[in-house]
Amino acid sequence: MLDTKKFGRELKRLGFHFYSGVPCSFLENLINYSINNFEHITAANEGDAIAIASGAYLGGKKAVVFMQNSGLANAVSPLVSLNYPFQIPLLGFVSLRGAPDIQDEPQHELMGKITTQLLELMQVKWMYLADDIKKAQHQLLQANQFINKNQPFFFVVKKGTFEEEPLKEQVLSFSSNQTKKMKTRTDQMPTRLEVLTAIHALQNSQAILIATTGKTGRELYEIDDACNHLYMVGSMGCVSSLGLGLALSQKNRDIIIIDGDGSLLMHMGNLATNGHYHPDNMLHILLDNHSHDSTGGQRTVSHNVNFVDISAACGYKKSIYIHNVEELKASISEWKKTKGLTFLYMRIAKGSKKQLSRPKIKPYEVKERLQNFIKNDPQLFTKGENTCKS
Ligand SMILES: Cc1ncc(C[n+]2csc(CCOP(=O)(O)OP(=O)(O)O)c2C)c(N)n1
């Protein structure tokens, strides 16, 4: 068995300071160590844990994710469409429930057989974690080399690998809504392009704009391809999780997330995680066109959902219904002064312009450019302009 404390200290020595995941009983002791000792974000879903940790990585932290192998299925979309194209490395620990040599429950049987094949299919390098501390320390050094080359690396963890590590009393924090403004008049229903243009014009020299999957990112790219932008080309639904990890690791920057109704509905548990950790420097804007506009305008079910109520109930400090572009501008300007985790909800028209280009810059280039922006901020700005150039 591994001495969990020794192993945890080794992770720390190698610079892994940020942790996120969803628990599994096979990983219980390591996760307890992480909760007791590290910055640990409990995610609602393993895919979001991947995105939260990836955001922290963008913000300069070496990050670790924990998950049961059943949750590896939840993590497939971000692993293949976020970590792979953006070349974002994470260290993963995935349990091996349903291993062929143990008695386990039927729901784990198939995943137990295919866990390592699934990692291989996703081109994620992996090893079975040794249960001898000397060997495990050596394996960590090997894994670290992959991380240093911008490649994710996963340890597959068998039952009984870690010695007992009791969970200390977890201090519960509560975040409560302070301002909730509901719909009071007719919506202006501007186009997404008009709204994105307004948001883009209002950012300041240290803000980072993250645009959700589909046409939101493509339209932002058309407005301006700046080094403080990130276009979330894949991993639909994970934009605010990426933003959360980034906001928590870059507390002096404004992190502005532009979400879509289809995307938000896909991972609505994020709202609860965001509300609980509630970084002051995060602004979450939802542009609701009641549709999956990017894939042909098919209706979502968002017409039946009150996102202002939901975000408020999840602990966003402010949840505000925005009726028109002027209100949006006023709320963003106000937020820049007062901060606090804020949700701005806005109805927009369906549709976008006919010839909409796609980012020519590769995702990993966007990532590198953003990392440079985070490191060198002022130099990338031309005096008097409010966006940075590549
Ligand atoms: C996991 C996943 N499912 C489906 C898609 C296909 N897809 C790309 S954008 C999109 C619609 C997104 O809808 P919404 O967030 O409301 O934004 P809108 O297109 O309306 O701007 C879909 C379904 C995808 N990229 N990833």
Image (cartoon, rainbow, N blue to C red):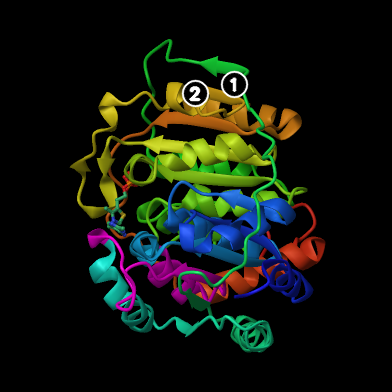
Compared across the picture, whether 58 is left or right of 321 comes to: right
Quarter of the rendering occupied by the N terminus:
bottom right
Evaluate if marks 1 and 2 touch, with contact meaning CB atoms under 8 Å apart: yes
Closer to the N terminus: mark 1 or mark 2?
Answer: 1
Disc 1 residue type (three-letter) = Asn
Q: Is residue 179 above or below residue 310?
A: above
Q: Quadrant of residue 315?
A: top right
At 45% across and 37% down in the image, what residue appears? Answer: 286
Compared across the picture, whether 246 is left or right of 348 comes to: right
At 51% across and 29% down in the image, what residue appears? Answer: 314
Seen from the viewer's position, the closer of residues 74 and 370 is 74
Compared across the picture, whether 362 is left or right of 246 comes to: left
At 66% across and 89% down in the image, what residue appears? Answer: 138
Query: Which residue position is annotated with label 2?
Result: 313
Query: Which residue position is annotated with label 1?
Result: 177
Q: Quadrant of residue 280?
A: top right
Residue stretch rendered in magenta on the structure: 78-107
Seen from the viewer's position, the closer of residues 62 and 359 is 62
